[in-house]
Amino acid sequence: MNFFKQLYITNFFFYCLIGIIMLFCCAFMFPVLYNATWYILLMLLSFFTIDILILFSNKKGIDAQRTAPEKLSNGDENPIVVSLKNFYTFTIHIKVIDEIPVQFQVRNFEINRKVKNASTDEFQYTLRPTERGEYSFGNLNIYVSSPLQLVSKRYRFDNNQMVPTYPSYIQLRKYDLIAFSHNLFQYGVKKIRRIGHTMEFEQIKEYVPGDDIRTLNWKATAKKNSLMVNQFQDEKSQNIYMAIDKGRTMKMPFNGMSLLDYAINASLVLSNVILKKQDKAGMFSFSKKIENRVVAEKRTSQMQKILENLYNVKTDFFESDYSRLYADIKKNINQRSLIILYTNFETMDGLHRQLPYLKGIAKSHLLVVVFFQNTELYQITNKKSETIQEVYDKVIAEKFIFEKKLIVTELKKYGIHSVLTQPENLTLDTINKYLEIKARGIL
């Protein structure tokens, strides 16, 4: 029974069979072909039998294994490695059909390769998940053919492998040193000119050309008989909270991912930068109520706590309750903090409904509202209009783009900082805004 489950006839065999049938048809008109066609058929059946014998004589002809990461990184290309060892005494042709998770909706996955006798081969493919959660792999199916390629023998490996998909830890590694880099422009982060300096004293050191002469310490200079200056550092242990709106405004898709998942990925990377700058990182999500709360701290386990809570953000896409957000912040965050709010406003009317609560938060904390540009509108405005309908669409698109800029101006009037960004630039722009606030010392 297992023999018939493993045996598959190749397309090449069927093509040969069709050719022989056509020869039999031609033999009615050219009888001389009749005997030759029978010989060809017998040869095909002989090779067919030989092919079965050489493939199935070796019970363990190959060994294969799929190696996936312990967890997938959401929104990134994740490598999946397939390693295979050939125990046959001849070069084999293989067709790999991996049963990848249903979330990818890939129905034509196939890899074809040749593997030399008694050798090992390794190859990989990539998967880009667009939502968090559990991804279950099925069987790794490998169809093996001999050089005759008349039949294939199917092997199955790695049944039911589950891999969780977490917020983008690949981006986390990419920007791991950004907090200390002196070449931030390489990452797309603009340089910020420091206005004055913070008053958190670090040490007294010898003057070197380029130091601010206004920080000269005259008492230390008199004792050392050389110029000495006071050195200051950025204030540390400041509270930084990331508030993630998981309401319906964050459901808009971009490159297969929702705005919510872009915000989650950016929050993870920014948390790492915050902790490396010796500040306290915290987060929470909100819609109808406040959930996934992590109190701002800078413990060694803080990143793991934030990662697990970001992974567990459940989306309901209801209308977000900003009055609940304001009340919760007023009750639970007593110390002045930087609150980075990931949300989205499409119109001025949408902003004005929530503006009283944003103004209330900004009275006690430094509030940064992060919202998104609609990149599809820019595609419409950059396209040449040829019909009246296209002209109308272009005017409406320009109206919405201008309204986004008005939202930035409106927030600025009330001392609320803002970041208007494209989804793909969200991580860099939020990191840059945080570093700007630290450099200016306005928290």
Image (tube, rainbow, N blue to C red):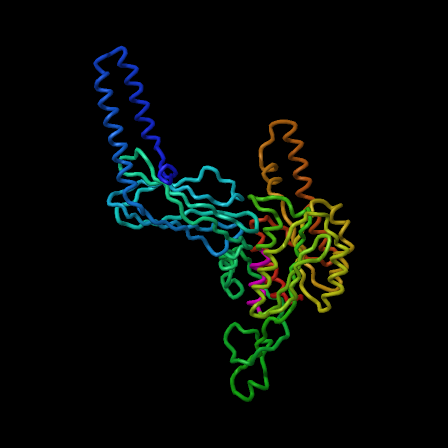
In the foreground, 388 or 165: 165
Q: Extreme bottom residue here?
A: 223
Look at the magenta stretch and give its main secondary structure. helix
Answer with the quarter of the image where residue 28 lies: top left
Give percent across and percent down for residue 61.
30, 46
Magenta-colored stretch includes residue 270: yes
Give percent across and percent down for residue 192.
58, 62
Q: From which residue to which does the magenta span run? A: 266-277
Residue at coordinates 30% horizontally, 35% vertically from top-left? 149
In the foreground, 261 or 392: 261
Residue at coordinates 59% horizontally, 77% vertically from top-left? 215
In the foreground, 305 or 357: 305
The C terminus, quarter of image: bottom right
Answer with the quarter of the image where residue 367 lies: bottom right
Q: Extreme front residue here?
A: 1
Q: Is residue 245 above or below residue 379?
A: below
In the foreground, 322 or 216: 322
